[in-house]
Amino acid sequence: MSVASVYPHYLAKVTKKGRSEEELMAVITWLTGFTEDEVRDYLAKETTFADFFQAARLNPHASLITGVVCGVRVENLEDPLMQKIRYLDKLVDELARGKALNKVLRS
């Protein structure tokens, strides 16, 4: 599955709750270590999540992301790729729920 196929859903989720695309991009760049231009390039190329996260420089504080996504605790996932995807899902959920950006970014 490509990141580009899910990105519009992330964007719709956060904007429907009054958050901005800039905030969504801040979450993605914080987690992955990519610049905004790099993220947009991966979206344009329809890069798969596997390739996207393989190239990412995961934030050292990503392990602080805890909680439940789709009924599963993200910190307990054994598949590293699925855990990274769920980290992103969890951050997007927190942003959409109105959590302050500095809290979402674990700063």
Image: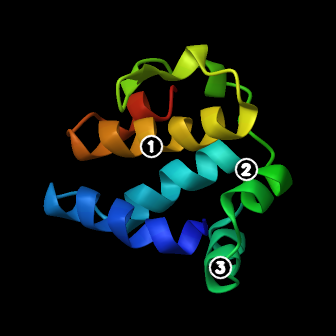
Q: Nearer the viewer, mark 1 or mark 2?
A: 1
Q: Residue at x 25, y 58 (%)?
A: 13
Q: Residue at x 36, y 32 (%)?
A: 70
**Secondary structure at numbered mark 2:** loop
Spot occupied by residue 10 in the image (x, y as percentages of width and height): 37, 60
55 to 88, vertically: above or below: below
| Three-letter amino acid code at the position of disc 3 | Glu
Which callout, 2 or 3, points at the residue further toward the start of the chain? 2
Spot occupied by residue 30 in the image (x, y as percentages of width and height): 61, 46
Q: Nearer the viewer, residue 28 or 102?
A: 28
**Quadrant hosting residue 99:** top left
Q: Nearer the viewer, residue 1 or 27?
A: 1
Residue tagged by mark 3? Answer: 46
| Three-letter amino acid code at the position of disc 1 | Asp
- Determine contact: label 1, label 2, CB under 8 Å: no
| Three-letter amino acid code at the position of disc 2 | Gly
CA–CA distance between discs 1 and 3? 18 Å
Which callout, 1 or 2, points at the residue further toward the start of the chain? 2
Mark sitting on residue 33 = 2
